[in-house]
Image: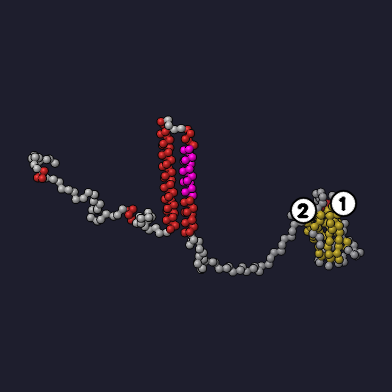
Amino acid sequence: MTTPENSDQPADQRVTRPEPARTAPLRKGATGAPAQPPHDAATHAHGDGHPAGVRDPDVLKVNEAVASTVRSAYDVLSETVAQGRKAAEQFRVGAYNVRDVPEDVRHMAGNLLGLARQLSSATFDICEALLRQTDGAMTPPPPGTTHVPPFQPPKAESTAPKAAPAAAPAPANEIELTMRIEGHDSALAHSHTLARPATPTAAHQFACDGLTLRGGTAPAITGVAFDPHHSGQGLVVTITVPPGRPAGVYVGAVYCATQPLPLGQLVIELT
């Protein structure tokens, strides 16, 4: 803008710019709506520094403990950095003495211990507040809210006949016998095992001199044969009863060719 040629006019007759109507920027939108208040004004509605929507004392206590701990951490960090810079400056100009190291270390350690103590206190405050807040959550549910399945009906026992239990195997020091009585329809066998010989013995090496009638004078039954069982375990003893033998109990000792002592007895009963 150029100045008028007649600059020698009196001051009261010169053209001057009017004073501005405002000194602050206009914070209105394009439509002329009033500007929104700052976020801090809506958040901190109280003068105590806490948010306006917070009323729980436990939440306030936790917030205060966390804020205090953060402030202490910043203070300790700032003081430690400042002390380090001061020591570095003194060391650079040659004014730092080695005798000052223990005192500086002791001072820094004290600050760190104080911060740790405050952190522990804040941790306990937070845990206490959480325990108080979980009182309602740890109460038992009201009656009727837990579903319990009904009892299952008892299972009916099967009416099918049970199988007879299998005979227990003979001990290792005994030989299992399978008795076959021929020539008599109503004979019973009462012998089931023999003692096992001390040395291996073949089936044809077993023998019985005869089964005699206990308490009688009838001739002995000498038709006794020993054969290996088809399963490979035990012996099959076949006793042939001659016709006309009286009823009673017949007993005979069993021997083998590998030892002199008898291995047991064969006992049958004719009825």
| Residue displayed at 88% across by 63% down | 214
For residue 241, above or below residue 82:
below
- In reply to whether residue 113 is colored magenta, the answer given is yes
Query: Looking at this rendering, what residue extends furthest in the top direction?
Result: 94
| Residue 76: numbered disc | none
Residue behind mark 2: 172
| Residues in magenta, as a range | 103-120
> In the image, which is nearer the foreground, mark 1 or mark 2?
2
Residue behind mark 1: 260
Let me know if residue 207 appears in the view: no
Secondary structure type for disc 2: loop
In the image, is 65 to the left or to the right of 176? Answer: left
| Residue displayed at 49% across by 37% down | 102
Cα distance in 3D space between marks 1 and 2: 21 Å
Secondary structure type for disc 1: strand
Q: Where is residue 86 in the image (x, y as percent from the top left)?
A: 41, 36
| Residue displayed at 86% across by 62% down | 250
Count of residue discs = 2
